[in-house]
Image (tube, grey):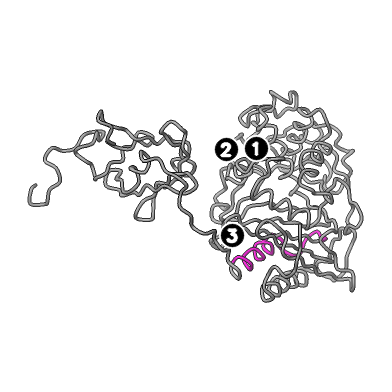
Amino acid sequence: MTTSQEELLPSTRRALLHRIAVAQAEGRAPSLVAAVVRDGRAVWHGSRTSVDGHGPNENVQYRIGSITKTFTAVLVLRLRDEGLLDLGDRLEKHLPGTGAGESTIAELLAHTTGLAAEAPGPWWERTPGSLRPELSDVLGEQPFLHPSGRRFHYSNPGYTLLGALVEKLRDAAWEDVLRREVLEPLGLNRTSMRPQAPHAGGWAVHPWADVMLPEPLEDLGRMAPAGQLWSTTADLARFAVFLAKGDDRVLSARSVREMRTPAAPPEAADVVDGAAYGLGMQVQHREGRLLVGHGGSLPGFLASLTISVEDDVAAVVLANCTSGPPVSLVAADLVRIVAEAEPRIPEPWRPMHDVDAAVLELAGQWYWGTYAFALRLTADGLVSLEPLSGKGRRSRFRANGDGTWTGLEGYYAGELLKAVRRPDGTVDHLDLGSFAFTRQPYDEEAAVPGGVDPDGWRGIGSF
């Protein structure tokens, strides 16, 4: 991966540096390091530090906290894609005896099991993992606080269970599976369970005085799949590229897109904030831009990985303090700065290579009752159906190879679209999940469910 500083305009680079400088100064962080990714590679790196002459570079490790959960989710999706489990499976099917076996794997990934947010006992982030050697120690006597599937409730113990699931089905330690199946294929050579020099130390900054206190660096033991990892901006930049585009050596583009898709019912406050959660990834709608990724924190460290897939821009921000700079906001700002200052240049329009005449005749205007829609064929082989008013239900559809198409998003996701033909082969109407789309509003020549009044359309004087 290149990290050429010349890839961005000087004014953009200065704006990025200014943003992290403000964050480090106002957040009183001992150090803050950041990277920006565009077009599949790192194009900028910057850092600010309180120690003169020792600015961290892209290879200095910081603890990344809950960004670890995204790595764990990748391992679980790999198991699913290999057919070793289904996301709808109860945990008990694969990992019996936990006391949380009625939860589905999808619920664990999306934090909708109703499990408690934290492990019982002393503050697990600042105490040795040896205090919680068994899953029962992580879950406690009453692990559930809410009914399963009803609400989003972030749960660190839930990801401990997912790590144990990976270990059971792979018959290997979570750490070893992660290194073999994700870190090595993606070239994340500076991502590890334990700190490897050079690495930052974790600090607590006094809220009312400019003094610091070192934080303990504990091995989290069973809780490792929820927040153990150390990494660098260079490695997380590579990981961001993978989360945006996929990599068939690890996980397909389709599966990482599934991870980025909201999967949990948001709280009312989350709806207002534009926040949601997918399968091991956070989703945020901010200032008209859809951002995905994950944040992380452990005593002494803050981290954020933020991606705008549409802009093809991502940012990583790491700091070595318990609180202070709002790293998720900073990462979002870095994405915005690049996306607005140097907008993505779209690929040239190109016509389709070839087209099926039977499909081409379906293109154009259709009516669902009196609602006007346009059906379009696109060069990527998909069909799109969208309201001419610009508002309403819309979806793209993937061809099934038998003259039908399956919806990919929105209201029509998973629904079947097909052309219903008359005996002479002409198209009567489109059927979409039982809805009839006709060439004219309530076309009297078409088989409209409920029929069409034989007297046809009329003015007010006809009543």
For the record, the magenta segment spans 320-339
Judged by its main secondary structure, the magenta piece is helix
Asked whether the residues under the numbered discs 2 and 1 touch, taking CB atoms below 8 Å apart as contact, a structural biologist would say: yes
From what the image shows, is residue 78 above or below residue 371?
above
At label 3, the amino acid type is Asp
Q: Nearer the viewer, residue 376 or 452?
A: 376
Seen at 65% across and 58% down, the residue is 39
Asked whether the residues under the numbered discs 3 and 1 touch, taking CB atoms below 8 Å apart as contact, a structural biologist would say: no
Residue 19 in view here = yes
Number of marks present in the image shown: 3
Furthest toward the front, the residue is: 354
Asked whether the residues under the numbered discs 3 and 2 touch, taking CB atoms below 8 Å apart as contact, a structural biologist would say: no
Mark nearer the N terminus (2 vs 1): 1
Q: Nearer the viewer, residue 101 or 197?
A: 197
Seen at 12% across and 51% down, the residue is 459
From what the image shows, is residue 263 above or below residue 104?
below
At label 1, the amino acid type is Gly
> Whole-Å distance between the Cαs marked 2 and 1?
8 Å
Q: Quadrant of residue 37?
A: bottom right
At label 2, the amino acid type is Arg
Q: Look at discs 3 and 2 and give the one toward the viewer.
A: 3
Residue 343 horizontal/vertical position (percent): 58, 66
Horizontal side of residue 426 vs 282, given as left or right: left
Q: Quadrant of residue 130?
A: top right
Q: Nearer the viewer, residue 72 or 119?
A: 72
Q: Is residue 331 magenta?
A: yes
Q: Nearer the viewer, residue 413 or 311?
A: 311
Q: What residue is pinned by disc 2? A: 150
Q: Look at discs 3 and 1 and give the one toward the viewer.
A: 3
Q: What residue is pinned by disc 1? A: 114
Residue 415 horizontal/vertical position (percent): 44, 36
Which mark identifies residue 311?
3
